[in-house]
Amino acid sequence: TFFSPSSVTIDYTSSSTLALVVDRGLFDRGILEQARKEGVDVHLGEKVCQINSYEDFVEIESGNEDCTKKVRAKVVVLATGINYQLHRSLGLGVPTGFMQGTQTEVEVEGLSETEIYVGKRISPGAFAWALSLGNGWARMGVLTESKGVSYLKGFLKERFAGRVKQENPRIFQKRIACGAAKRSVRNRILTVGEAAGQVKTTTGGGIFYGLLCSEIAVNILQEGFSKADLSEKQLTQYDKLWKSK
């Protein structure tokens, strides 16, 4: 059900599934296990401090605190989400803007379907949502330009007064990239996912676009390996192709 600023409602029921609720933690762990099964050597709890690009290889400096560990590779794929510290040191672009995604999970009465709310009083710049998770629980949130916590609290108070069981629910907030990064490749380096600004700006979702663009990255990298060419000129094809999508 869609709710307008004047409380006009529009009910819509699709004949097929339009979207799925993803348990992000479970999703990420599943990808990690798949990678391990394919032979990926995983290093957890290490911070990458610096990446140096040379003509024939890249060198990654990492470690827990001192960053004394050095690893060489033929190519680096940056999937750092909204952490752009390495981007700046490498001369890579960052997204043109950001939104705030603010969300909580609560027990609520009388919510059996997804509800979408629009209007600058509730969620300026985007929308608010209430999504049933089953068993009386719901995920509720707002996508705003700023002051997300304040708008989420106002949304719960105004639209769900007396229906939410938790008085002070735990609130999670995250910056969400808006707009593609101007440059997503350098010599032997490319970025994917939110690190490149591959986000659906209408909803702030990034999983589908990230997977779509990752497939493009794989194809371009395979081509580069076959030609022994992982230069910025070769990888620029990736930048052009994903932005054309």
Image (cartoon, grey):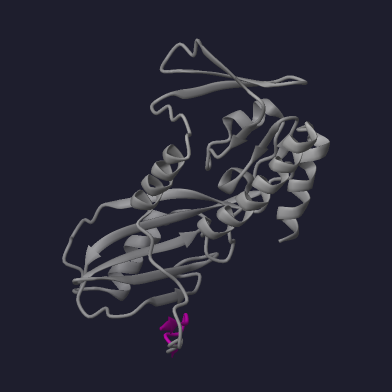
- Position of residue 217 measured from the top left corner of the image (x, y, whole percent): 66, 46
**Residue depicted at x 31% and y 52%:** 171
Q: Quadrant of residue 222?
A: top right
The percent position of residue 165, horizontal first and vertical second, equals: 16, 66
Q: Position of residue 221 (x, y in %)?
A: 70, 40
Q: Is residue 57 above or below residue 107?
A: above
Nearer to the camera, 104 or 167: 104
* Most distant residue in the right direction: 233
Residue for point 79% across, 46% down: 237
Residue 134 placement: quadrant: bottom left
Q: Residue at x 71, y 54 (%)?
A: 242
Magenta region: which residues? 1-10
Asked whether 224 or 4 is in front, the reply is 224
Q: Is residue 109 magenta?
A: no
How many callouts does the rendering have?
0
Image vertical order of residue 222 relative to residue 159, above or below: above
Quadrant including the N terminus: bottom left
Q: Please state if 146 lies on the left or on the right of 33 as rendered.
A: right
